[in-house]
Image (cartoon, rainbow, N blue to C red):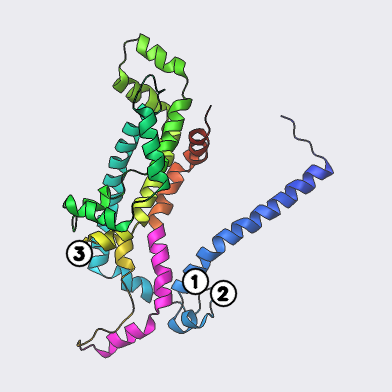
Amino acid sequence: MVETKTVGSRVFKVVNYIILTILAISCLYPLWYELCVSLSDKLAAESGAVTFWPVGVNFGSYELIMGDGAFWNSFMISVGRVVFGTIWTMVVIIMMAYPLSKRSREYKPRTILMWVLVFCMLFNGGTIPWFITMQKYGLIDNLAALIFAGSVPVFNVLLLMNFFRNLPADIEEAALVDGAGPWRILGQVGGPCSVPVIATVVLFTSVNYWNEYFQGLVLMNSEDKYPLQTYIRQITVQIPANVTLTTEQYQQLAKNSNKALEAAKVFIAMIPMLIVYPFLQKYFVSGITLGAVKG
């Protein structure tokens, strides 16, 4: 394709770059502002004096969060939750999406199951029935609840199902002629062909497991079982009652601000996902496009 280098095309390119730059800055500035607030001293953070740069650099918020053994315990719980939860959820999603991608004459329960999925996506039973269900299965104050409580995201099932439906039928027919069964077709044909959408669903699932805090707050009775997102939301700058503190400890508490602490929480929570995202980014756009369009 030959690019037309007319005056109009050049003007359009310049304007396009300017608009995209403005949009990028508008998206990144709130994150930069939060970083500046988290690194500012108490007076600047509380008075709103922080704009583009930290005022009176102070790492007290990060020291308060990360200098606690309970923080690292919650961090490891969240890492385990993301790893095992993503694996379990992907198995469930693939086992649901593949048969539902077949036509009704090939898989007779498909129509009924599709209506059930749509109903579950549109209507929610509510927190109380969900809590009672988890209680009946003995998952209260059980770390397994952090994995099983939300392991069937219907949207991701539909996304992967639509991708499987778009795979050429000739490929599966050729595999059947060669003597392959359903499991082998899924493992050696459907799986390798669906890497982009699977990577996209893995990203969605891992981000959801990492950011979810409500389940830990409701289902866990002890703080030593809190995932990271639940734990850091409990951290505040406060002077403990009936505890004698040294002058240095009082000074350390006086340096910290709840506003700066909240900003520090945002960045600590983002770091793992920012590390994972670049490895899956190249599959993201193609996975969304291929999984959302029915051929």
In this rendering, the label closer to the viewer, 3 or 2: 3
Question: Label 3 belongs to which residue?
Answer: 221
Q: Is residue 136 left or right of residue 11?
A: left
Q: Dot 1: what SS?
A: helix
Q: Dot 3: what SS?
A: loop
In this rendering, the label closer to the viewer, 1 or 3: 3
Say if residue 9 shows up in the picture.
yes
Kind of residue at disc 1: Cys
Identify whether 46 is placed above or below 9.
Answer: below
Which residue reaches farthest top?
A: 177
Identify whether 164 is placed above or below 48.
Answer: above
First in sequence: mark 1 or mark 3?
A: 1
Kind of residue at disc 3: Asn
Kind of residue at disc 2: Thr
Give the quadrant of residue 165: top left
Crowding near the residue tagged with mark 2, few <14, some 14–19, many ≥20 C-alpha atoms within 10 Å: some
| Magenta span of residues | 244-270
First in sequence: mark 3 or mark 2?
A: 2
Q: Magenta residues: mostly which secondary structure?
A: helix
Q: Nearer the viewer, residue 288 or 19?
A: 288
Which residue reaches farthest left?
A: 138
Question: Label 1 belongs to which residue?
Answer: 36
Question: Label 2 belongs to which residue?
Answer: 51
Q: Dot 2: what SS?
A: loop
